[in-house]
Amino acid sequence: MIRYALQCEAAHAFDSWFRDSDAFDAQVAAGQLNCPICGSHSIVKQIMAPAVAVHDQEPQPVVAPGSKDHEIRAILRAFRQHLEANAENVGAEFADEARKIHYGEKDERAIYGVTSPDEARALGEEGIEVLPVPVLPDDLN
């Protein structure tokens, strides 16, 4: 079995397992592959790093294509892609920038970045709405 990182023509990223590379090619040629987000049949492989086995870690559970977990991961991945395409990454300055926007010191705009759990809690206590965006295990590779 081989897992490929795939992408549709709308730049939705997802992954799927195949018996071998010939199985992938055959399914693409037959129009059997489609994007789980938009349904597009125009699918290409993305560049992937080789998987390296690490024996001192517990194995991660496999998420079967078509399962509810797979569907949820696809939705979360689409949400993250939408956020990255439509908001400004302010990085570690997230809490400061969110406060400046909230208190009218900067123009209102969509932002994302990183902050500590304590700082996120403090923002909430100030009435500044924040939403943690989950990082999927596959996104860390």
Image (cartoon, rainbow, N blue to C red):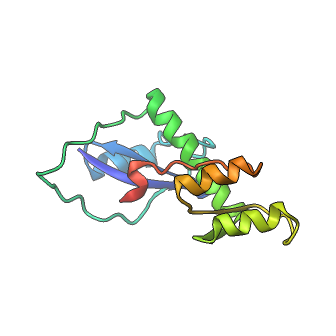
Q: Residue 9 in the image: x percent, y percent?
A: 60, 57
The residue furthest left is 55
Pick the quarter of the image with the C terminus: bottom left
The residue furthest top is 68
**Closer to us: 86 or 115:** 115
Residue found at x 64% / y 62%: 84
Q: Is residue 63 above or below residue 126?
A: above
Q: Is residue 129 above or below residue 11?
A: above
Q: How many marks?
A: 0
Residue found at x 79% / y 68%: 100
Q: Residue 25 in the image: x percent, y percent?
A: 37, 51
Residue found at x 31% / y 45%: 23
**Closer to us: 73 or 55:** 55
Q: Is residue 57 above or below residue 104?
A: above
Quarter residue 104 falls in = bottom right
- Specify whether 114 is left or right of 27: right
- Specify whether 51 is left or right of 71: left
Pick the quarter of the image with the N terminus: top left
Q: Residue 137 in the image: x percent, y percent?
A: 38, 49
Q: Residue 96 in the image: x percent, y percent?
A: 69, 69
Quarter residue 81 falls in = bottom right
Quarter residue 92 falls in = bottom right
Residue found at x 53% / y 58%: 116
**Closer to us: 57 or 61:** 57
- Specify whether 39 is left or right of 57: right
